[in-house]
Amino acid sequence: MYSKEVMEHFKNPKNVGEIKDADGVGKVGNFTCGDIMWIYIKVKDNVITDIKFKTMGCAAAIATSSMATELAKGKTLDEAVKITKQDIATSLGGLPAIKLHCSVLATEALAEAIYDYLSKKKMPISDDLKKKHEQIKKELEMTEKRHGDFTKDQGHC
Ligand code: FES
């Protein structure tokens, strides 16, 4: 079902953890399954110099977070915000159709971390990113309302 690359990133995920003095933090949730993900970034001269994630979710969510952080590291904010779920899935040698939605969480968490950084720095934010942020924020609120506070829970799938 899963490719060799997915299994490798699930068993040995890269960039797991938290950055205490992160420049930007993104937290997202999936309303349907209840999975939650955080991405933390450090930024210097508009480039993501360090990135970490925490995911309470399925194997695909963990593998896609791991790959998203690998793809985003060293990229400019403009490049990183353009990373798509297809980029992540392709880099992982494909994902089963039923698990494609899991890769959306990773792109959203990355977008949220970038949004957080830009707003803290009072830098210009594109209309696309603002719109995405509003949708993501709404889904996270609905997810926490429906599934409870996963920051105190252990994930379920
Ligand atoms: Fe929830 Fe994969 S992200 S099932």
Image (tube, rainbow, N blue to C red):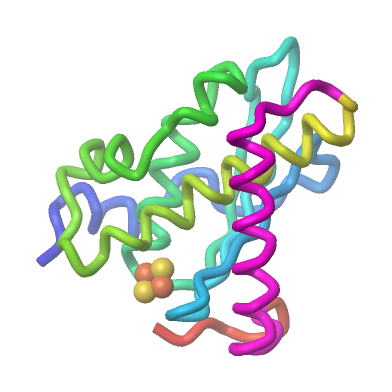
Residue 32 against residue 105 in the figure, above or below = below
Residue under the image location 24 percent in, 54 percent down: 6
Give the mark count: 0
Residue 149 relative to residue 9: left or right: right
- Where residue 80 appears, x then y in whole percent? 52, 27
Quarter of the picture holding the N terminus: bottom left
Magenta segment, prevailing SS (helix, strand or loop): helix
- Where residue 70 appears, x then y in whole percent? 44, 34
- Ligand 1 quadrant assignment: bottom left
> Is 127 part of what is drawn in magenta?
yes
Q: Quadrant of residue 141?
A: bottom right
User: Which residue in the rendered view is the most extreme toward the left?
Assistant: 1
Residue 55 relative to residue 117: left or right: left
Residue 76 relative to residue 152: left or right: left
Regarding residue 56, the answer to whether it shows in the image is no
Quarter of the picture holding the C terminus: bottom left
> Is 149 part of what is drawn in magenta?
yes
- Where residue 38 appears, x then y in whole percent? 63, 57
- Where residue 137 appears, x then y in whole percent? 68, 60
Residue 156 against residue 44 in the figure, above or below = below
User: Which residue in the rendered view is the most extreme toward the top?
Assistant: 45
Q: Quadrant of residue 146?
A: bottom right
Residue under the image location 63 percent in, 24 percent down: 48
Residue under the image location 16 percent in, 48 percent down: 94
Closest to the observer, 4 or 98: 98
Magenta stretch: give its range: 123-150
Regarding residue 74, the answer to whether it shows in the image is yes
Q: Quadrant of residue 120?
A: top right
